[in-house]
Image: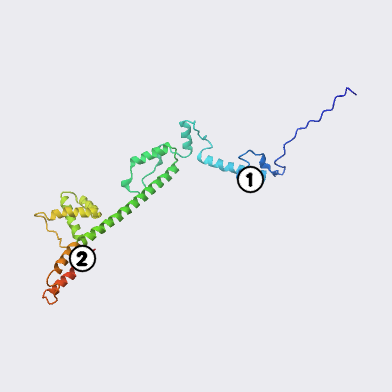
Amino acid sequence: MDNEAPETPEQTTEQPAAIVYADGSFAENWRESLPDGVKDFGPIKTVPDFNTLVQNYVGQEKVIGSYKRQIGLDKVAVPTEASGKEEWDAFYKAGGRPDKPEEYGLKRPDDFPEEMFSEDRAREAFSKMHEMGISKRQAEGIWQWYHQNIAKDLQGAQQTQEMAAEEIKGKVLEEWGNAYEANVHIGNVGAAKAMDGQSEDYKERLLQKINADPDLIKYSYLLGKQFVESPGAPQVRTAQSTPEQIEEQITTLMQHPAFGEKMHPEHEIIMKKIQGLYKQKHNVR
């Protein structure tokens, strides 16, 4: 029996443990067999069984496929940094970019000031959006957002300007008192004289601008004052006085001998004049 060959142990191949059972349930700790970065992915932790995993995958693919078909990406490859212009153009077109910049078809919004809108700048914007591959829908959103913000800034600037003008007007009113209207009239007379020979439309526009700006009102008054005081100039009613002038008149009257003596024949006249001046001084518009 010495010639008998020695027995060799039977070689067996160890099969990996199954992570999915026949009923579709997962084995315990099944995620440990997944690659790093996947096994700890949040949605993976919530999948209860294999069937649910497959259903989720199919559902996501349907959604992604529908979106790709909607924008044309099911027929166009997504370009990379190495892609040429033709590939990018095909991709942009599939995404909704028009063939030419002018085909965006965007106009000046009705509520946007015409004087603030530039056709040349609009064309530049369309060219830039087309170059960047902006779709028509995206361009409409950008266009609306841009002009709304510009209009808001303009409105804020106008309100600030109006507040500043009211503040200046208040100072002019304080300085001129009840002579304000007369001084404005003097300024308008001088402005009208300077505009001799101009069209009525031009005169009206300019006077509206002058009378809306307290600084211009005062400036036109200074010019008009020189005109109305020049020889041969038409007579302009300037009888109203400034608060300072009224105060000077009161001081002069109070220095009259009749002011301090009740028995003086002119005492009552002087007092009535002073009372009238005080009333006039405090009746500032």
Q: Residue at x 64, y 43 (%)?
A: 53
Residue 251 location (% of width, % of height): 16, 66
**Image disc number at residue 201:** none
Measuring 68% from the left and 42% from the top, which residue is drawn there? Answer: 30
The crowd level at tag 1 (other Cα within 10 Å; few <14, some 14-19, many 20+) is: few
Residue drawn at x 35%, y 52% is: 156
Question: In terms of image quadrants, where is residue 50?
Answer: top right
Colour scheme of the rendered structure: rainbow
Of residue 105 and residue 265, the one placed in the foreground of this image is 265
Q: Which residue is mark 1?
A: 45
Residue 115 visible: yes
Residue 32 image offset from top left, x and y in percent:
67, 41
Relative image position of residue 15 (x, y in whole percent): 74, 35
Tell me which numbered mark, 2 or 1, is placed earlier along the sequence: 1
Q: Nearer the viewer, mark 2 or mark 1?
A: 2
| Residue pointed to by mark 2 | 281
Residue 23, quarter of picture: top right
Name the foreground residue: 76 vs 254: 254
Task: Tell me the element at label 2.
Answer: helix
Instruction: Quadrant for the N terminus, please.
Output: top right
Q: Secondary structure at mark 1?
A: helix
Taking the view exactly as shown, the residue that stands out farthest to the bottom is 263
Report whether residue 110 is seen.
no
> Compared to 76, does 150 lie above or below?
below
Query: In the image shown, does 131 or 242 lie closer to the viewer?
Result: 242
Q: Position of residue 272 (x, y in %)?
A: 16, 72
Where, quadrant-wise, is the C terminus in this rendering?
A: bottom left
Is residue 284 positioned above or below 39 on the image?
Answer: below
Under mark 2, the amino acid is: Lys
Q: Nearer the viewer, residue 276 or 17?
A: 276
